[in-house]
Each structure stands twice: as structure tokens, then as C-alpha cells.
Image (cartoon, rainbow, N blue to C red):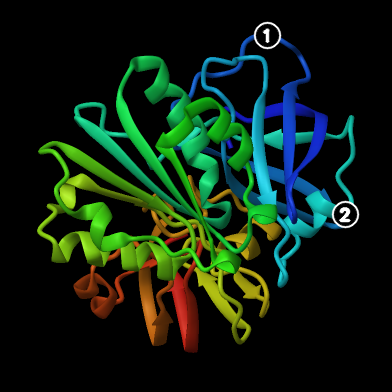
Amino acid sequence: MMGDLQMRVTALHDEAAGVRRVRLEPVEGGPLPAFSGGAHVVVAMQDGAVIRRNPYSLCCDPEDRTGYEIAVARAAASRGGSAYIHERLGIGEVLTVGAPTNLFQPDWRAKKHILVAGGIGITPFVAMMAQFARAGLAFELHYAVRSRAAAAFAGVLQDRYGPRVKIYAADEGARLPLAALVENQPLGTHLYTCGPERLMEAVLDTARAAGWPDQALHSEHFMAPPPGDPFTVTLAGSGREVAVGPDQSLLEALEAAGLSPRYLCRGGVCGECATKVVELRGTILHGDHFLTPEERAESRTIMICMSRFSGDRLVLDL
């Protein structure tokens, strides 16, 4: 992709149980492209014969232009990216990193910012909080974790921001007081959530039930492409057929075949990889968060980063 950076791993640190923080610095030196809290980068990793491209939120201070930092949870059912970072990535390795993209931008007009994180969903908030604090803005973090040992960044965030950071550890019987969080907030408050899907749905549903407008609610969805039955896609421009494996996304299969489709998030949120369906005999298994229910029913567009297909023939405008 345009704007790719060659970056060297200069530090690896176990931020919490099962969470590894990686610092990347530019091979050629010089200041890195600026970013704001909530931004992510796509990291390409050469894992044997396979190139794995995964999006990760930047969890460093945006004022630091000398390096980027990401934190990656060890996934029990890893598709390869987290296993590579936890088991094989070493100091000095050079990775290809895309320029920062922000699909989770804070609303700087807000009078107050409430952040609700679950597990590794803490990562975008680390950078956000640094900016909020520097600007003197009102904010508070509510962070749900399995245990304090698994709470990445908890100690440093509590040291920096004191009572504005609240930790809820499940093994201590603590639960997020969602109803209380969304009640009696000052006009102009915005709510942000990142973490497991069920947590984010609960946060957003509770806020909407309490009358919060959608423009004051923000969430970030980074999901791995779902596995499924293999299928074949035909490219309308050339008539070429590309096979998609059971543990491979359509986007990954096209890249492996030498194509360079557009993308930004690789998680079904941004809409950049929306591709026109030319012919369809079967069913698109939509896995994105971008298309409306009506657009899904029409099946004229597929998000190639997250969606699959079941049927006899799928021809795309590629």
C-alpha cells in the first residue's frame, strides 16, 4: 500500500499476562507521520511463505514521532498474527507498517469523554488519554478485565491519571456499572467503547436506552475474518478464478494471488474494500459492520476483508 514504512523492532515487553507490547522505529530515521488517539496501523509480517497483515491500534503518545507502539494479545485461536508476535518476532526484525489511519477519532467538541474498555480494547485509549490530559479535557476510563494480572497498561494509567481510571476485575467480582455510567452525565458528553463484541453491544445498548444520541456514541470493531467453507471467486476483468481457503479471507486470497485490493481497516468497518458484485448464484455471508441491512439483502456489494460466499458462482468487479 502507498505510504508503507519499513520499521525495525527495537523493544519487546510483556505488558501483562498474555499481552506483548512492540516498539517499532523507522529504519531510515526521521520523524514518523503524525497520528491522533484512536489511530491504527496495518502491520505486515512474513510468516514463512505467508504474509500476515493485521491492524493494531497505536498505544503510544502521539507526541512521540520517533516510534510507534502496538500491544497484541495472545489469541487462543490465533490465525497467525498474534502467535507470530508472541513466539517468533525478535528485536531487530524489520516489518512493513502502513501509515496511520484513524477510524475511531475522538470528537474534540465534546465537553467530557467517557472511555469503556474491555481486555485488549484498552490500546486505542492509551493514546487518547495522553491527548485529553495534555489538552486539559475532562475524561474517565472504565476498564473491564479478567484479572488485574491481565490488565495491560493498568498500573501506568492509574499512576498518570489517578481516580480518573477505574479497573473492574472479574475474578474480584467487579462488574462495569453501565447503567450508572450513562446516567446524569453533562450535556455534550461522548462515550467511546472498544473490546469484545458483547461488551461493546452492552455499552451501546445501555446508552441508547438511556436516551444518548448516536452521534455521541463511538466504538471500534477489530475482528478477525471468520473461517468457513472454501469457495472460488471469479474476477470480471480477466475471467481469472481465485480460490479462497477455509481459514483465509477473500482479501487475503486476492493478495496471495498477486492483486492489491484497497483496504484500510481489514476489519469490516471502514468500507474501503467495498467491491461490486457482478454476478451471484448463491449467498454472501456478510461479516462486516459497514453495510446496512438493506444493502446486505440486495447483495450488490461485498466487503472482501470479512465476508464469505456459499454457492455456485460469485463474480466481482475486479
Residue 226 visible in the snapshot: yes
Nearest the eye: 55 or 2: 55
Residue drawn where x is 63% and y is 83% of the image: 230
Circle 1 is placed at which residue position?
Answer: 30
Q: Which amino acid does label 1 sit on?
A: Gly
The residue tagged with tag 2: helix, strand or loop? helix
Would you place residue 42 above or below residue 212 in this image?
A: above
Question: Quick check: 169 above or below 186?
Answer: below
Residue 87, label in figure: 2
Residue 193 place in picture, x, y as percent: 38, 52
| Circle 2 or circle 1, nearest the eye | 2
In the rendered structure, which amino acid carries the disc numbered 2? Glu
Which residue is rendered at x = 52% and y = 51% of the image?
Answer: 121
Is 23 on the left-hand or right-hand side of 238? right
Quarter the N terminus occupies: top right
Please state if 116 lies on the left or on the right of 157 as rendered: left
